[in-house]
Image (cartoon, helix red, strand yellow):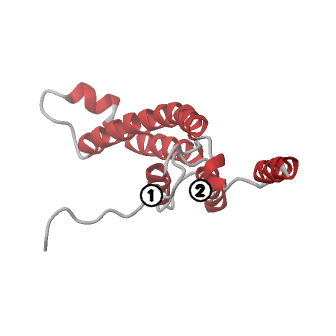
Amino acid sequence: MADLLQQKKLSAFIEACLDPLPAAILVDTAYNSTMRHARWNEWRKARRLTEAYRAVRDLAEVFWHGPLVGLEAIHSAIGDRHQLWVERYRAAVAVQILTPAPDQVSVKWKKQAAKDRYLPISSEQIAQAIAEDEAWLAAHPTTKEPRKTRGSRCAS
C-alpha cells in the first residue's frame, strides 16, 4: 500500500515537471533589459547626431534671412548653406529611423518623424524598420505581465 502511494506521488511529480510552463514564467526580463540597454546606446548616438544637425539647421534658418549685426562671419559660414544643413538634418533623421528602437517611445518618435516626405529613405524602408522594432519589442518584454492602465490620482 505504501509502495502504491509513493508511486502515485512520483507520477504526480513527474507529470508536474513535464507540463509546459506559462509563457509569463519563461520570460527572462534581465536578459531583455540588457538587450534594450544595448539598443539604447546605438539609439542615443543617432539621436545626438540628429539633435546636433537640428540645432545647426535652426541656426542656419535664422541667418538665412540675412546677417545679424556683429555675426556676419557666422552668416557666411552657416546661413549661406541653409539647404545643405536641412539635407544633413534629414539624413540624420533617416539614420535614426533605421537605428533599432529600444522602447515604444522611440517607435512613436519614428512614426512622427516619418511624416517628413522629403526624407532620403523610402516609406517602405521606414515601415519595415518600424515593424521590425515593434516585433522585437513584443518578443523582448521587460516585465512578465502586460502593463496595467493606471487610474487617475485625482478625484473628479
Location of mark 1 (residue): 147
In the visual, does 49 lie left or right of 95? left
Q: Secondary structure at mark 2?
A: helix
The residue lying furthest to the front in this view is 1
143 or 40: nearer the eye? Answer: 143
Residues 145 and 68: in front is: 145
Residue ID at (37%, 41%): 54
* Residue tagged 2: 134
Q: Earlier in the sequence, mark 2 or mark 1?
A: 2
The structure residue drawn at horizontal position 52% and vertical position 45%, both measured from the top left corner, is 142
Expressed as whole percent of the image width and height from the top left, the position of residue 73 reads: 25, 25
Q: Residue furthest bottom?
A: 156
Identity of the residue drawn at 52% across and 43% down: 102
Query: Within 10 Å of the Cα at label 2, are there few (<14), some (14-19), or many (20+) other Cα atoms?
Result: some
Of the 4 image quadrants, the one containing the C terminus is: bottom left
Q: x and y percent of residue 25 in the render?
A: 62, 49
Residues 42 and 85: in front is 42
- Indicate the amino acid at tag 2: Glu
